[in-house]
Image (tube, rainbow, N blue to C red):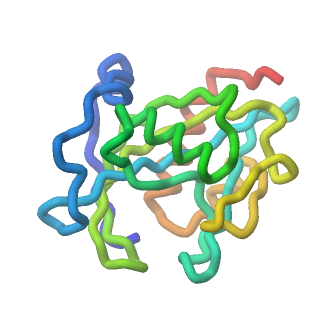
Amino acid sequence: MQAPHAHPTPPAPQSESVLHAPLPPSLGDGTPASPRLVVDVLLAVPLAQGWRLLLLLRRPEQGGFWQGVSGRVESFDAHLEAAARREIGEETGYVEGVEVFDLERWVEFVSPLSGRTFKKRCLGALLPAHAGPASVRLSDEHSEARLATFEEALALVRFPENRIELLALQARLSARPPRV
């Protein structure tokens, strides 16, 4: 990820409406003038020991880095939450018991693999307590899954912007004890 630019967003009540707002007529073409719209979702799992993050390792030919779930918003997605839920299902197999919420950040970046420009909405998702490496159904984009503490995740992710997103998720969950 090169030169990410974070854009502050409105407070939570309005940001939750971002999840369900109609999509723009154009989802972008990947140029600097028209960045391609994507979602980036960090996955939290409630355990008795506290919150853990489900991280996915992209295959080496796809960058070889740890991440949550990410993907393009498609024209058939009703809104950003629908895109996030679709991507979570495609990349992990989890569709039931998933709660998606907004982390209130827009970030533009240039992909180090394709050179294309993207605009992502940073989201979080709570997965069921059984979610983890043993039950995840990896897509062909990923080679491995693991559960990590926030500290471990901060050390594993490659891009500085992902660390900022992890800290936003940690702050959001700090007042919410995990229910197992």
Residue at x-position 55% and y-position 33%: 171
Q: Where is residue 98 drawn, in percent x and y?
A: 64, 30
Q: Where is residue 132 drawn, in percent x and y?
A: 80, 46
Position of 90 relative to 36 (above/below): above
Position of 162 relative to 122 (above/below): below
Say which quadrant the C terminus sits in. Answer: top right
Q: Where is residue 121 drawn, in percent x and y?
A: 37, 45
Say which quadrant the N terminus sits in. Answer: bottom left
Residue at x-position 36% and y-position 48%: 74
* Left or right: 152 as drawn, with respect to 158: right
Residue at x-position 83% and y-position 36%: 130
* Left or right: 124 as drawn, with respect to 94: left
In this view, the residue in front, 78 or 1, is 78
* Residue 100 can be seen in this image: yes
Q: Where is residue 86 drawn, in percent x and y?
A: 52, 42
Query: Which of the 4 image quarters holds residue 179?
Result: top right
Query: Which of the 4 image quarters holds residue 62?
Result: bottom right
In this view, the residue in front, 50 or 106, is 106
